Image (spheres, helix red, strand yellow):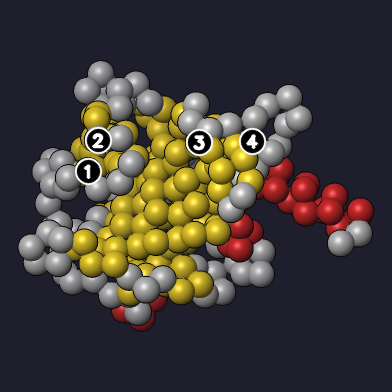
Amino acid sequence: MTRSLLTTALLGLLSLTASAHSLWIEELPENAGVGVRFAEWGEDFEVSPGHLDSFAQVAGWTLDDKGEPQVFEVSKKKDHFFLGKVAAKTPAFAQAQFTVRKLHEDKPARAPIFYCRWQPEGAGAGKPAMTMDIVPTDKPGEARVYFRGKPLPNVEMGLHAPGKDQQKLTSDAEGFVRVTDLANPGAYLLTVARYSEDLPGFFNGVPYGITSHSASLYWVVTKK
């Protein structure tokens, strides 16, 4: 790769980091099942070839009628990772490992991990199922943020609601967050972005000093 191409690639990663990209699960058109999307909310989906290829590992699963995980055979498509079909009122989950990123010479490299939960209507209260998880309660618009199995208090969050700009929220002292306005039907996305943990390691042979955790909860409010 030439120097100019290397520079272009690096600038692309830097701009991606600066933008408010999220990873989430949504229902695909024509009842095809559910898939994982990566984009800045409201903008075009990232594609392959392109930034979608920056995910080195993507895993997904749903739950059977006994609540046991059923793992999907994940496949990469043009603008999403295809998970599969899920039973009615059954949530779906995904975990994705991004390539290690060294963006500043004076700061350690980061290993970004994304956690996604798709919550269909009628699924009811959930239980923690990922290292970082935004877990719905049995109250409309309420969720609880967990990190390593424990409630995560006072964490900054983002909310994308139909017809509105992004809103900033914060979980309370017990990790709860509440979306009080569900008047507009459509898709809602609740996120935690780049929660840093001083946990070094290696991924695909590349060292890093910080593990970065991002989570999303996606659900749809139907018109009554």
- The kind of residue on which mark 2 rests is Gly
Q: Which residue is mark 4?
A: 109
Q: Are marks 2 and 1 in contact (CB under 8 Å)?
A: yes
Residue at point 78%, 47% (across, down): 11
Q: Are marks 2 and 4 in contact (CB under 8 Å)?
A: no
Alpha carbon of mark 2 to alpha carbon of mark 4: how far? 26 Å
Mark 1 or mark 4: name the one nearer the start of the chain. Answer: 4
Q: Quadrant of residue 89?
A: bottom left
**For residue 178, which quarter of the picture?**
top left
Three-letter amino acid code at disc 4? Ala
Q: Secondary structure at mark 1?
A: loop
Residue toward you, 108 or 175? 108
Q: How far apart are the two marked residues, 3 and 1, measured between alpha carbons?
A: 20 Å
Give the mark nearer the N terminus: 3 vs 1: 1
Q: Do residues under tags 2 and 3 come within 8 Å of each other at their CB atoms?
A: no
The image quarter containing residue 144 is: top left
